Amino acid sequence: MPDDNSALAVTLFSEILTADQLLRNRLSKVLPKGMEISHFSVLNHLAFTGQERSPAQLANTFHVTRGAMTNTLSKLEWAGYVHVRPDWDDARRKMVAISPAGRRARDQAISTITPMLNEMVADLGTEKVRAVLPILRELRGKLESSD
């Protein structure tokens, strides 16, 4: 039986990784020109939370290195999509907030990806999507707790 579980595990993660790659490819094609998935993800997070975050907090949220997050934030700041300011309580840290231009860029990205995502959900069926969400959330939780 261990071989059955091993094959099942490999098949599960192969499907997840392939779906991730295919979704990233599709998203990259429909996101506004010059916007990368990482840019959209950070803007979406900042818009959703409505709060400033430190680069370290953002790196932790997205499970990337601080260097990778600094690179993403530099590009977003250059584009005018985020404001980066010193932390008034700790001069060693910075704080990041979404700018009005960043909110508009995020909203434009949402409007360009929503039709594609809606089509996928419709093709799969809303009941199937609702059924798989708790399983995916549980899997994500297990993966996060093992970091």
Image (cartoon, rainbow, N blue to C red):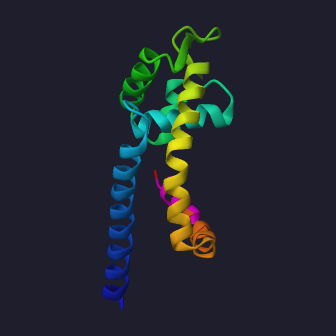
User: Is-magenta flag for residue 90?
Assistant: no
Figure quadrant of residue 98 = top right
Image location (x, y in percent) of residue 61: 53, 39
Q: Magenta segment: does it hold 143?
A: yes
Q: Is residue 38 visible?
A: yes
In this rendering, the count of numbered labels is 0
The percent position of residue 106, horizontal first and vertical second, equals: 55, 33
**Residue in view at x 50 percent, y 28 percent:** 56
- Magenta stretch secondary structure, dominant: helix
Residue 97 vertical position relative to residue 90 in the rendered view, above or below: below
User: Residue placed at 58% from the left, 37% from the top?
Assistant: 45
Say left or right for 58 vs 69: right
Q: Nearer the viewer, residue 109 or 86?
A: 109
The relative height of residue 113 versus residue 117 in the rendered view (above or below) is above
Q: Residue at x 38, y 63 (%)?
A: 19
Frontmost residue, 92 versus 118: 118
| Rendered location of residue 108, percent (x, y) | 54, 35
**19 left or right of 138 in image:** left
Task: Identify whether 22 is placed above or below 57.
Answer: below
The reply to whether residue 145 is in sight is: no
Q: Quadrant of the N terminus?
A: bottom left
Quarter of the view holding residue 15: bottom left
Residue lying at the far bottom in this picture: please name it. 1
Q: Nearer the viewer, residue 107 or 136?
A: 107
Look at the image and give the residue range highlighted in magenta. Answer: 137-146
Query: Along the horizontal axis of the image, is 59 left or right of 45?
Result: left
Residue 112 in percent (x, y) is at 50, 43
